[in-house]
Amino acid sequence: MLEVANLEVVYNEVILVLRGLSIDVPDGEIVALLGSNGAGKTTTARAITGLLDVHEGKTTKGSVSWNGTEITEKNPADIVRSGISQVMEGRRIFAELSVDENLVTGAFTNRSNESANYDRVMELFPRLMDRRGQTAGLLSGGEQQMLAIARALMAEPKLLILDEPSLGLAPKLVEQVRDTIVEINQQGTSVLLIEQNAMMALSIASYGYIMETGKVVMDGDAKKLLADDDVKEFYLGLHGDEGEKKSFKDVKHYKRRKRWAS
């Protein structure tokens, strides 16, 4: 189980981004972490996976624990070895390497089951099988996202952190990514799904957290969040009993304050 408790993160010693954040990811569950740009979602992922230093960030309060062991100060390689893998926003594949070479890098911390894990990801993503020798940078956006997820799975994680996996993808590909996340979870991997696409994330999650300005402002059962009027209005672009869609401009400038901000 992942436990993030009262976490504060500062960038460049002056910019406070996380303000007492607390979230849990139980074993075997999909948990959604939602919020708009700048809410602190990616910083949360970096704090969990030990990548704050790369971005001049530092944890100043709170802790991150994994299966009862604090990992707040551990280096990224040790965190991956402990069973946590991350797919970063923007895919971040090695564009100059082939598909197979990208997958080999994903197995760097866990060579013992490399062959079995390779077979697993090829079964999950059969399209990659046909492109094994192709340069990764020449893949389509959807194929690159598949490769990024497959590479993370090569480490055989117990917890997979996905940062905006639907970003920039066509609706049909978003559905494929969603279905793949469900399948990965059914195979025994817990998932922390960090998304702006609330509908996609909450449709498959068991629990959800909504972030604003570095802290959780609402959390609960995913189905209840989907039915909540404020979530519909400000994250799904809906309002009223009829579920009428509003334009982005209407949502952005709508005057009624959110109940959680009062």
Image (tube, rainbow, N blue to C red):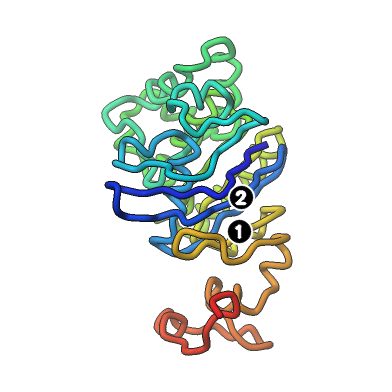
Q: Is residue 108 above or below residue 93?
A: above
Instruction: Identify the residue at horizontal 57%, vertical 66% (top origin).
Output: 217
Q: Amino acid at mark 2?
A: Ile
Q: Which percent across, then down, holds residue 228?
A: 67, 74
Looking at the figure, which quarter contains the N terminus? top right
Left/right of residue 210 with respect to residue 226 in the rendered view:
left
Q: Nearer the viewer, residue 5 or 189?
A: 5
Looking at the figure, which quarter contains the C terminus? bottom right
Instruction: Identify the residue at horizontal 43%, vertical 26% (top origin).
Output: 75
Left/right of residue 82 with respect to residue 105 in the rendered view:
right
Q: Are marks 2 and 1 in contact (CB under 8 Å)?
A: yes
Label 1, on which residue?
Answer: 209
Q: Amino acid at mark 1?
A: Tyr
- Mark 2, other Cα within 10 Å: few <14 / some 14–19 / many ≥20: many
Q: Of the residues tagged 2 and 1, which is closer to the observer?
A: 2
Q: Which percent across, then down, holds residue 193?
A: 56, 49
Q: Which percent across, then down, holds residue 226?
A: 67, 68
* Residue 23 image label: 2
